[in-house]
Image (cartoon, rainbow, N blue to C red):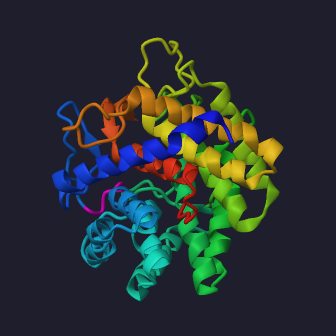
Amino acid sequence: MSRWKALNAAAIWEQIVLKLDGMIAAMGEKSPHVAGATGKYDDMRLDWWTSGFWPGMLWIAYDMTAEERYRSSAWSWDERLEKLMLQVNNFDHDVGFQFLPTAAIKYKLTGDAEARRRALYAANFLAGRFNLRGKFIRAWNGDKHGWSIVDTGMNLSLLFWAASESGDPRFSHIAQEHANTMLNYFIREDGSVHHIIDFDPATGEFTEAIGGQGAGPDSAWSRGAAWALYGMANAFRFTGESKYLHAAQRVANFFIAHLPEDHIPHWDFRVETGLEGEPRDSSAGACAASGLLELADLLPEPEGRCYRMAAERILGSLYENYGTWDLPSHEAILLQGTGHKPAGQNVNVSLIYGDYFFVEAIAKLNGWSHRIF
């Protein structure tokens, strides 16, 4: 056990609890995504991809503390999401981000049968987006039927969970096929990743790589790397297939090697003009840290230790340099997130998924084991 973990993880968790209590009072039923200079989180539509992260933080807090206020604040979210699914909506490949931290964890912690049904319903929806020829899960909606993105690797856990919970192996079959496609097309030999891959939706043939939220088709978007290393670690945890574990290690090694002195990644590791002055992405750091803790637990102690230490360095820097602990009116936990730099959207802001993965990772350091991703 490292000195940092032994001395600080419990104290950081106590500060998180205080922050969550303030967020409950300030946000009510808002579905947050971004908090800008005002420190106030916005309120997005429920079918927006980030709608599961705030209730997910509440469920983790309930599991860690057994305090009823977290349970009652989180309880209705999966029901609200399902009601919207029965209307005209924009749900897509990210239903794992929405139903794992709401319905699936609610069922795990409370045994609620309706929550189980809703999570399986969402898994069926996700499975229905699978392209048989290209062996990928389609991203987004609209007319780009051949687009698939690295983010979807984090949503595969919903399918793996559904296979285990229902006994129907087709969910796992689809998840593994998409994971294999990630190995073949998304994760480069050096451990960097593509954001978007375009396939011919009719034949399944590869067409091109697209930069998406990265700096370009050949760049190294840091949050994409975080999605990939965490997603591949999960694929190994569910399947035992060593190829996924090795891929997670390859991405993790690239990510760690490219971190700056304060251990928090720039939004892209491979910007042509250089990284000086480029914004950081605290959300990429938080997600990667939680994924690195997963990876460490999947490996023998001597081999996993370096990944755990890297996660702790990232989390320590996020806490010390990027937190809002001295800003009591600020609704978020982490500063300096970057959403979509190429589009000029949500740069140097707080992002709810950065907050979620920071809470998840600190909970893990304090013994939390009810994994949902």
Residue at horizontal 74 percent and vertical 41 percent from the top = 305
Q: Residue furthest front?
A: 7
Q: How many marks?
A: 0
Q: Is residue 200 above or below residue 127?
A: above
In this rendering, position of residue 373 left or right of residue 105: right
In this rendering, position of residue 73 left or right of residue 314: left
Q: Nearer the viewer, residue 284 or 275?
A: 284
In this rendering, position of residue 101 left or right of residue 245: left
Q: State the image coordinates of residue 232 (x, y, percent, origin top left).
A: 66, 53
Is 194 within the magenta?
no
Range of residues picked out in magenta: 46-50
Quarter of the image for residue 44 reads bottom left
Where is the C terminus found, in terms of image quarters?
A: bottom right
Q: Is residue 67 above or below residue 51?
A: below
Q: Is residue 103 above or below residue 178?
A: below
Residue at horizontal 19 percent and vertical 62 percent from the top = 29
Residue at horizontal 57 percent and vertical 23 percent from the top = 270
The rendered magenta stretch, by its main secondary structure, is classed as: loop
Where is the N terminus found, in terms of image quarters?
A: top right
